Image: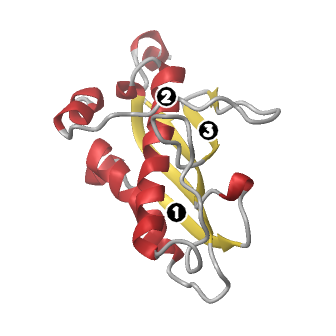
Amino acid sequence: MRYEARLQELGLTLPPAPKPAGVYRPLIVVGHMAYLSGHGPLLPDGSLLVGCVGREVDQAAGYAAARQTGLAMLATLRRGLGSLDRVERVVKVFGMVNSVAEFTQQPAVINGCSELFAEVFGSENGVGARSAIGVVSLPGGMTVEIEAVFELRVTGAAAAG
């Protein structure tokens, strides 16, 4: 199944692709690899989900923020690549959770993004290597920030060498 069709089948709506909030590019393609800069939990109205896990929000809200961040990342991929169907697989996900020092379930929070990618890209191509860490703060007080690397499909003349 193609990923654009899978997105529709799942009934998922992507927020607008976020614009850079500094001097960087949200997406860089080098060869057959797509590198996504850190993304936050961007809502369709342009606002961010904010709050420190373990203080202002709970683990479930952190999970929801990570899932929303994954949707924003998919929006960036679609805008930059023209279609999610250009993605071959998730290679690496790095998630940062705005959390209190005592909170130790950062991987469970970042599962919100990882499970979304597995739903969209499948259990084989949607699951890559991953790290999840806690941080004392994130820009704008957002709950999570996630970056990722994707392998792109080799097509046409590029596949022929």
The reply, left or right, for residue 4 in relation to residue 160 is left
Where residue 135 appears, as percent x and y from the top left, is 70, 71
Residue 74 visible to an observer of this rendering: yes
Circle 1 Cα neighbour tier, 10 Å, few/some/many (<14 / 14–19 / ≥20): some
In primary-sequence order, the first of circles 1 and 2 is: 2
> Which residue is label 1 attached to?
130
Please tell me which residue lies in front, 156 or 60. 60
Q: Is residue 128 shown to the viewer in this render? A: no
What amino acid does circle 2 point to?
Answer: Pro
> In the shown orientation, is residue 133 left or right of residue 4?
right
Mark 3 vs mark 2: in front: 2
Query: How would you rate the neighbour count of disc 3 (Cα within 10 Å): few for under 14, some for 14-19, many for 20 or more?
Result: some
State the CA–CA distance, disc 1 to disc 2. 25 Å
Residue 17 x, y percent position in the rendering: 53, 29
Tell me what residue is drawn at x 62 percent, y 28 percent.
29
Secondary structure at badge 2 equals loop
Determine the residue positioned at 47% across, 57% down.
Answer: 66
Q: CA distance from mark 3 to mark 2?
A: 19 Å
> Which residue occupies the extreme bottom position in the image?
102
- Dot 2 corresponds to which residue? 16
Q: Which residue is mark 3?
A: 35
Please tell me which of labels 3 and 1 falls first in the chain: 3
**Residue 78 appears in which quarter of the rendering?**
top left
On the picture, is 6 further left or further right than 71?
Answer: left
Q: Amino acid at mark 1?
A: Arg
Residue 85 point in image, percent of width and height? 34, 26
Mark 1, secondary structure of its residue: strand
Mark nearer the N terminus (3 vs 2): 2
**Between marks 3 and 1, how big is the CA–CA gap?**
14 Å
